[in-house]
């Protein structure tokens, strides 16, 4: 498990072999500035998800459910491309949600549930 020093919650929390990964935002975590570019923003968020999974010894192959929160729902096309490239069949279940705001000015947030 990892703890965030900036937030009062775990970045990844495991209970009974199920790992819940908190929402990873499309920002540069060292500067808290938004990552420019549509696909680049999606990749930044998913890369952070991967980092959080790795902190508990897992990777994207363990993901059973993902939720993408998109500031602009037209990002769905790039999200679909990313999903096909980064998640291997059978791909996990996924939900895409349009939202009116993302922390730190990011374009997306991705959270996942993984199973050990």
Image (tube, rainbow, N blue to C red):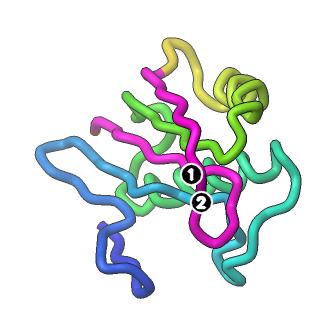
Picture residue at 58% right of the left edge, 21% below the top: 88
Side (left or right) of 66 relative to 17: right
Picture residue at 12% right of the left edge, 45% below the top: 16
Circle number at residue 102:
2
The answer to whether 50 is drawn above or below residue 32 in the figure is above
Q: In terms of sequence position, does the residue under pointer 1 or pointer 2 come before the other?
A: 2
Q: Residue 64: say if magenta.
A: no
Mark 1 and mark 2: span between their CA atoms? 7 Å
Graded by Cα atoms within 10 Å as few (under 14), some (14 to 19) or many (20 or more), the crowding at tag 1 reads many
Quadrant the N terminus occupies? bottom left
Q: Position of residue 24 (x, y in %)?
A: 53, 58
Magenta stretch? 92-115
Side (left or right) of 8 relative to 29: left
Picture residue at 54% right of the left edge, 30% below the top: 96
Q: Residue furthest toward the front?
A: 100
Dots 1, 2 in contact, CB < 8 A: yes
């Amino acid at each position: 498990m990892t703890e965030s020093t900036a937030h009062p919650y775990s970045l990844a929390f495991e209970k009974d072999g199920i790992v819940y990964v908190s929402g990873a935002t499309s920002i540069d975590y060292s500067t808290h500035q938004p990552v420019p570019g549509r696909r680049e923003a999606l990749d930044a968020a998913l890369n952070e998800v991967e980092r959080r999974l790795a902190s508990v010894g897992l990777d994207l192959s363990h993901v059973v459910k993902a939720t993408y929160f998109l500031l602009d729902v037209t990002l769905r096309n790039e999200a679909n491309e990313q999903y096909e490239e980064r998640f291997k069949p059978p791909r996990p279940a996924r939900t895409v949600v349009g939202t009116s705001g993302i922390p730190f000015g990011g374009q997306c947030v991705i959270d996942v549930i993984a199973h050990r």
